[in-house]
């Protein structure tokens, strides 16, 4: 059979990005100032800020200024422009055409591009360094570009963040102040009063970790770029609403109640006040709702599906001329496979979740957990596992959907 070319020939694209793995929990790492991830989690995570000089020595911005501006032109990319001209804060939402951004010669503006990891393999590789934290908590990598004086003003966030300087310098000032009142009438969250307790100038490779609710203000000293590695921590409000929706969508709630009951009112009297809610209706529906039950499996099913759901606007990019299964296996046996940068693959004890879909874990499930944790399988490892034809069939399906690619990062 003639060898059909794959859309992403691995040999042409193999790069160092694929070689970077998250640090192991008990090995000191420069990324965390020579703490082990275990020490960092115990001492700092969600507790207090940490400045790390040269967390990533010789770091390079994942993409150039012009490539970032080009990304901000796409309508599937979330981009914001914050200007602070003549002492007035202004916010505009993308997409931004080439002429929409101020001149790079003008000071006091910043462009923030969210979810760069979904569009750029180097950004995804940078995010992967933080996988000593669970994928369920990692959110995205945002890049901000600023001209001299640019920033978003003193504010606080509700999420943990690692602020990694990748180009130029930025002065960060922070405070654990209790007063988090915001200025009124502004398009962005700016603190009414900000009293810096500490300040540092960050250079490329330096990083600042901030837990939620630490007031901070980052001002560009000359042109600069900062990567924000952000986390998600859904609110109970969001979880309750989404969980009940999940139960309802699957009919699980009705299943646990016993029967899909319908309201009956054989004893309803004729009424003088048709607009009034019947008391019997409230009572009967209240009794049905009180019988809604769920178990841990429902919670796992909900969390896995919800957290692996692609974000709004995510579109996968399947190969235009997909290789046959045999050619795919041949290619993967040499170059290995990796999850596409947009793919989310999570697992529980019985099921796994890929891009919002839940499936039972296959009987021989080791490979799936390995792929989910490492986001890749080396060629040699793929060969060892490939005797399992159900595995190769499933991976070929994912490859055809654009969820899995052969080879290393592009
Ligand atoms: C920035 O990178 O300019 C803003 C990031 C932040 O303060 O959260
Ligand atoms: Co912030």
Image: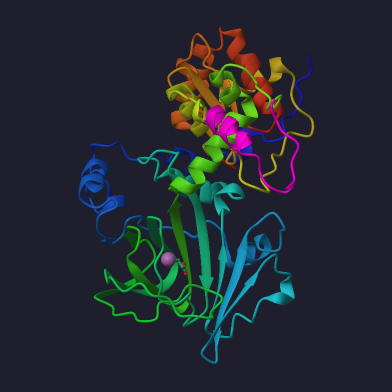
- Residue 398 or residue 126, whichever sits in front: 398
Name of the residue lying farthest toward the bottom: 86
Coordinates of residue 400 in the picture (x, y in percent) = 71, 27
Give residue 257's quadrant in the image. Answer: top right
Residue depicted at x 41% and y 72%: 155
Side of 110 where 268 appears, left or right:
right
Give residue 134's quadrant in the image. Answer: top left
Side of 47 where 289 appears, left or right:
right
Colour scheme in use:
rainbow
Coordinates of residue 331 in the picture (x, y in percent) = 63, 23
**Ligand 1 position by quadrant:** bottom left
- Residue 89 or residue 372, whichever sits in front: 89
| Magenta-colored stretch includes residue 220 | no
- Report if residue 103 is visible in the image: yes
Q: Write down the region rendered in magenta.
A: 267-289
| Magenta-colored stretch includes residue 273 | yes
**Rendered position, 112 above or below 395:** below
């Amino acid at each position: 059979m003639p060898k059909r070319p794959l859309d992403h020939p691995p040999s042409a694209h193999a790069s160092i990005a694929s070689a970077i793995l998250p640090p192991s929990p008990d090995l000191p790492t420069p990324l965390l100032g020579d703490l082990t991830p275990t020490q960092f989690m115990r001492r700092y995570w969600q507790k207090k800020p940490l400045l790390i000089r040269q967390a990533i020595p010789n770091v390079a911005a994942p993409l150039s200024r012009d490539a970032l501006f080009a990304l901000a032109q796409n309508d599937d990319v979330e981009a914001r422009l914050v200007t602070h001209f003549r002492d007035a804060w202004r916010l505009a939402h993308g997409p931004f055409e080439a002429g929409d951004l101020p001149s790079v010669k003008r000071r006091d503006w910043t462009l923030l591009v969210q979810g760069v990891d979904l569009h750029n393999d180097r950004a995804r590789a940078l995010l992967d360094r933080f996988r000593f934290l669970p994928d369920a908590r990692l959110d995205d990598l945002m890049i901000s570009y600023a001209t001299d004086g640019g920033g978003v003003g003193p504010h606080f966030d509700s999420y943990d963040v690692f602020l990694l300087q990748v180009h130029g310098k930025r002065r960060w000032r922070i405070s654990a102040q209790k007063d988090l009142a915001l200025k009124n009438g502004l398009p962005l969250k700016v603190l009414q009063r900000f009293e810096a307790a500490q300040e540092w100038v960050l250079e490329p490779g330096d990083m600042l970790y901030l837990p939620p609710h630490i007031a901070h203000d980052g001002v560009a000293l000359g042109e600069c770029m900062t990567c924000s590695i952000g986390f998600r921590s859904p609110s109970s409000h969001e979880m309750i609403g989404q969980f009940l929706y999940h139960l309802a969508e699957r009919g699980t709630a009705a299943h646990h109640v016993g029967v899909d009951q319908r309201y009956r009112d054989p004893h309803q009297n004729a009424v003088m006040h048709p607009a009034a809610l019947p008391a019997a209706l409230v009572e009967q529906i209240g009794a049905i709702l009180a019988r809604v039950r769920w178990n841990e499996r429902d919670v796992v099913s909900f969390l896995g599906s919800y957290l692996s759901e692609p974000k709004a606007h995510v579109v996968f990019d399947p190969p235009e001329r997909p290789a046959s299964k045999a050619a795919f296996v041949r290619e993967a046996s040499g170059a290995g496979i990796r999850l596409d940068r947009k793919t989310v693959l999570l697992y529980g004890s019985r099921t796994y979740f890929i891009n919002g879909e839940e499936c039972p874990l296959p009987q021989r499930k080791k490979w799936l957990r390995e792929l989910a944790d490492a986001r890749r399988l080396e060629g040699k490892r793929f060969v060892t596992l490939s005797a399992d034809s159900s595995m190769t069939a499933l991976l070929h399906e994912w490859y055809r959907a654009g969820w899995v690619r052969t080879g290393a990062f592009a």
